[in-house]
Image (spheres, coloured by chain):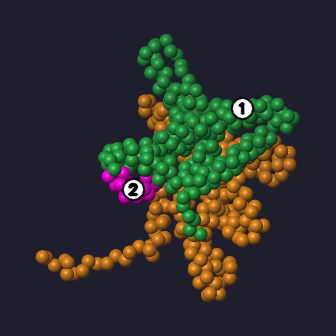
Chain colours: A orange, B green
């Protein structure tokens, strides 16, 4: 083990880790904005609404993220009309390509998770909302979406961790994230074990923090389900 | 075929490589999964800790990192071992297919261990007590009682993992195995038609996913044939 190699490159790796996290956060925010309307369309009864979304989700869940990334980064640059359009501002850079691909990818997964959440809501709650005279928009805003988020939270935390692991793929399209730094150093020094295991440890730490955050959020959101803390009876406190 | 610009046969060969890697990783990954699941349910704390460590690490580290650790790390380790016995050895490179199958089986094992653990726990205690009462050994109980009973419960989870395993084979292109993604990259390098070849690759993966989903539906129907549906 060459510990000096690790120590020398640790600052660079942490810089790379920040790029990874930055990609992850932007992707998740944009993906969520896209996923909510998609999920609402997915649970509609009319095929004209849910069928296109179903195939969108199927496509992004059924094909590897790497192939999607390559298709966007290498493939779209070949098409003349893309190069001449406003999209080229985003797609001419690897960062923009990664953001676009990841956003579409995570939106598909998240929409599916939210759909699962919406579908597990007991129908009585919808009936109750309708009995109060709520309109459809109000029903979604006040009842269905908040309930669905709470139900879908454990599945969504898995998706966030999966997306973090997905960001490691940007090192294949020349972005220097955590994995990219590790691969560059390995190419120079051939210290594969040291660099990759260090990278693995940093990823593990980030994963751990993410799961902790979700655990805390879940604990807070389910506070109405927790048993009430009862003070022990004074009778039991009395010395026997 | 004009559409494939003469790369049709290479792509066809690449599909078989992808399927071979996926099946190899599935076979060894199922073994890993059952082994680690048994470890996680062990009576001894040390073995339980090892099982938990394995699943935590595999599930928390990107698949790409695992592939690269196995490929480059394996090359270094095996070169050093060979040098120990024979100082003339300069360099031994692990074949990409072996590294790919091994790393993907680790990933599959880490995730499937959780599925198997849940499925093993779902086997009723009475069944195991009955097996013990007729004098079965623990291996016989596992093979004759636990495995057939947990199979039905584990199947949907394992099926999802199989579909993501097929997708993960694309990662081995990074270390140069001639599977679908790699062949697309090579074809693109000579013909300069990246959109066409990556679109072909993505459609092949999509077809594989559709076939797998349907096959799994059949398997699940077969596994559930003795059970009546609630609705």
Residue placed at 68% from the left, 34% from the top?
B16
Q: Which residue is mark 2?
A: B127
Which residue corresponds to the image point at 81% horizontal and 53% vertical from the top-left? A86
Q: Is residue A79 visible in this depiction of the protein? A: yes
Of B159 and B67, nearer the camera is: B159
- Whether tag 1 and tag 2 are in contact, CB under 8 A, the answer is no
Q: Quadrant of the N terminus of chain A?
A: top left
**Which chain does the residue under circle 1 lie in?**
B
Where does the image place residue B180, in percent across and percent down from the top left? 70, 37
Frontmost residue, B121 versus B14: B121
Please name the residue that numbered disc 1 is placed on: B13
Q: Which secondary structure, mark 2?
A: helix
First along the sequence among labels 1 and 2: 1
Residue in view at x 50 percent, y 30 percent: B73
The answer to whether residue B202 is above or below residue A210 is above
Could you say whether the residue bearing mark 1 is in a helix, strand or loop? helix
Up/down of B56 relative to B21, above or below? below
Q: Is residue A235 left or right of residue B122?
A: left
In magenta segment, residue B119: yes
Query: What is the magenta range?
Result: B118-133
User: x, y percentage for residue A125?
Assistant: 58, 79
Q: Where residue A41 sits: x, y (%)? A: 71, 68
The answer to whether residue A208 is visible is no
Q: Do badges 1 and 2 share one subunit?
A: yes
**Chain assignment, label 2:** B
């Amino acid at each position: 083990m060459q510990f000096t190699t690790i120590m020398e490159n640790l600052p660079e790796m942490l810089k790379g880790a920040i790029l990874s996290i930055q990609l992850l956060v932007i992707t998740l925010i944009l993906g969520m904005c896209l996923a909510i309307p998609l999920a609402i369309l997915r649970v509609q009864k009319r095929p004209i609404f849910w069928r296109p979304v179903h195939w969108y989700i199927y496509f992004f869940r059924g094909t590897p993220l790497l192939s999607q990334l390559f298709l966007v980064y290498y493939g779209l640059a070949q098409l003349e009309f893309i190069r001449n359009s406003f999209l080229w501002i985003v797609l001419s850079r690897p960062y923009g390509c990664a953001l676009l691909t990841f956003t579409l990818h995570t939106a598909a997964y998240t929409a599916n998770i939210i759909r699962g959440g919406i579908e597990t809501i007991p129908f009585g709650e919808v009936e109750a909302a309708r009995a109060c005279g709520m309109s459809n928009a109000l029903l979604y805003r006040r009842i269905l979406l908040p309930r669905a988020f709470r139900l879908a939270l454990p599945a969504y935390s898995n998706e966030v961790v999966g997306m973090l692991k997905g960001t490691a793929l940007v090192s294949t399209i020349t972005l220097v994230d955590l994995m990219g730094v590790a691969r560059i150093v390995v190419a120079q020094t051939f210290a594969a074990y040291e660099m990759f295991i260090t990278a693995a440890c940093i990823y593990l730490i980030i994963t751990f923090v993410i799961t902790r955050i979700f655990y805390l959020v879940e604990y807070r959101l389910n506070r109405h389900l927790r048993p009430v803390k009862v003070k022990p009876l004074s009778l039991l406190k009395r010395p026997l | 075929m004009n559409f494939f610009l003469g790369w049709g046969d290479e792509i066809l060969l690449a599909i078989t490589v992808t399927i071979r890697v996926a099946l190899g990783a599935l076979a060894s990954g199922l073994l890993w999964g059952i082994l680690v699941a048994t470890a996680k349910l062990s009576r001894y704390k040390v073995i339980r800790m090892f099982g938990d460590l394995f699943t935590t690490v595999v599930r928390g580290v990107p698949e790409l990192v695992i592939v690269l650790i196995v490929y480059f790390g394996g090359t270094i380790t095996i070169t050093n071992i060979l040098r120990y016995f024979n100082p003339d050895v300069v360099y031994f490179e692990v074949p990409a297919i072996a590294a790919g199958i091994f790393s993907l089986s680790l990933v599959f094992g880490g995730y499937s261990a959780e599925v198997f653990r849940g499925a093993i726990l779902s086997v009723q205690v009475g069944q195991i007590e009955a097996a013990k009462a007729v004098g079965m050994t623990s291996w016989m109980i596992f093979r004759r009682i636990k495995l057939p009973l947990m199979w039905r419960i584990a199947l949907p989870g394992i099926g999802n993992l199989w579909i993501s395993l097929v997708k993960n084979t694309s990662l081995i292109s990074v270390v140069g195995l001639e599977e679908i993604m790699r062949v697309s990259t090579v074809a693109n390098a000579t013909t300069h038609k990246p959109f066409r070849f990556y679109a072909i690759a993505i459609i092949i993966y999509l077809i594989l996913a559709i076939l797998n989903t349907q096959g799994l539906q059949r398997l699940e129907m077969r596994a559930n044939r003795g059970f009546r549906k609630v609705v």
